[in-house]
Amino acid sequence: MDAMLVNHCTAGDFLSVSFDRAGKEAIPRKGIYRILVCRPNHRLGNTILLTPLIEELESLYRGAEIDIVAEGGIAADVFSAFPRVNHIYCLPKRGFKHPWSFLSMLLQVRRTRYDLIIDPCGGSNFSRVLTRFFKGQYKLGFGDPVTHPGLTHLVSNSVAMRHMAKRPVNLLRWGMPPQAQDAEHFFPLDIRLTDSERALGRSLLHDLLATYPKAETGPVIGIFANATGAKRYPAAWWNDFIRALKEACPDSRIIEIIPMHGKSMLGSEWPGYYSSNIRRMGAVMAGVDLMISADCGVMHLAVASKVPTVGMFCVTDASVYEPYGPGNNPLLTQGLTAAEAAGRVVQVYRNVLVGSADAQPGLAVAMPSDDAKDNVGQTDGGPVSCSSQVTKSH
């Protein structure tokens, strides 16, 4: 369990402090069949970061049915291959501008009395209000009884893990009785691409690569150069980065993944793939040898599509949003030039990019992380590669 535990208490100690004081018992392992996860958010990244929680629920309650309250249509695509997920209630974006459809859907959810309702996000007042509004025997979330009334089971924010994908799983584990399980194991991000989706992705990628000369058969590197606000790197930075990457790996083939707005971020210099279907986009990314992306939802989509992924971080906290799991690394670009950043990528993924066994699994950095995973690179001081404004949203 995370090192942030208060006074080094055990799970049982914490549960006795949180629940027994209020006369509540831990959420049972049996008798839970109808589950609702309340995460009304329209962002791609935040939705994909829920997939480990859904897998955790599937493993704990094998006969249960899971409903999800989301916002916009992204969740329907992300969870379309999850057989235990039944209803996905996609609230309209800016729902108060569509009051009748908004209220109608909320009342539809409220007709079901759930055995367990989970509010996985401690920082959303809207999510908490909806969790209180819906009907459920057990209601679980972060907070304390004074500032967050209305839930049957509250877990202190002080034990929340840093990574946003692990935090909801951590919440569920704290809310349940202590059990014999590997507390360090967390399911990876996964949108569960089907075999047919992956085959289509390979076919689409093959068509894109046909634009390269036949003599070029090196590794395929996918680039996603867009991000919101201060997380976006300038086009000139990306051009320098790719130039250095090509100098180190001249046989590599670059593919740009085009953002939802349908415009290249790299001046259409490289073959680009565009799709408004996120699963099809994920399937194409699954066919490349390495994905490199700024910190954004598409970075999480790449990880969830099972392709080795480098996530670029210049303002947000990598320990909260880093692409975790085997083959994935965050690249902290503070103090690095674009060429130096490219050099770090080549150093870590040399076996993928140039076929050498001298690749390093990661470069140690002095940055906290839930699983103590090494990061690709970080230096102290020096200019920041993109705006210094901190962006909290994802």
Image (tube, grey):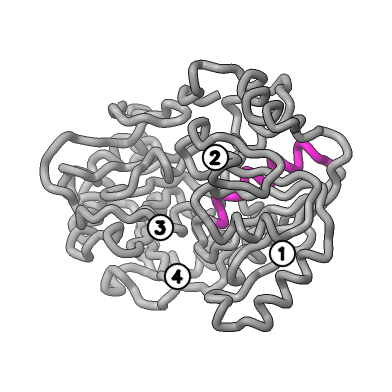
Can you give x and y, in whole percent of width and height, for residue 24 in the image? 75, 32
Amino acid at pointer 2: Arg
Q: Residue at position x 31%, y 26% from top? A: 364
Mark 4 = which residue?
273
Taking the image as shown, residue 394 lies to the left or right of residue 388, namely right
Taking the image as shown, residue 347 lies to the left or right of residue 70, namely left
Inspect the magenta stretch and tell me whether residue 369 lies in it: no
**Residue 88 marker:** 1
Mark 3 = which residue?
393
Choose between 188 and 31: the one closer to the eye: 31
Do labels 3 and 1 touch, CB within 8 Å?
Answer: no
Choose between 332 and 31: the one closer to the eye: 31
Can you give x and y, in whole percent of width and height, for residue 342 in the image? 24, 46
Q: Which residues are magenta?
A: 47-62
Quadrant where the N terminus is found in the figure: top right
* Front position among marks 3 and 4: 3
Q: Residues within 10 Å of mark 1 (few under 14, many from 20)?
A: many
Q: Is residue 258 above or below residue 362?
A: below
Mark 2 = which residue?
167
- Closer to the N terminus: mark 3 or mark 4? 4
Residue 201 visible in rendering = no
Q: Residues within 10 Å of mark 2 (few under 14, many from 20)?
A: many
Choose between 136 and 364: the one closer to the eye: 136
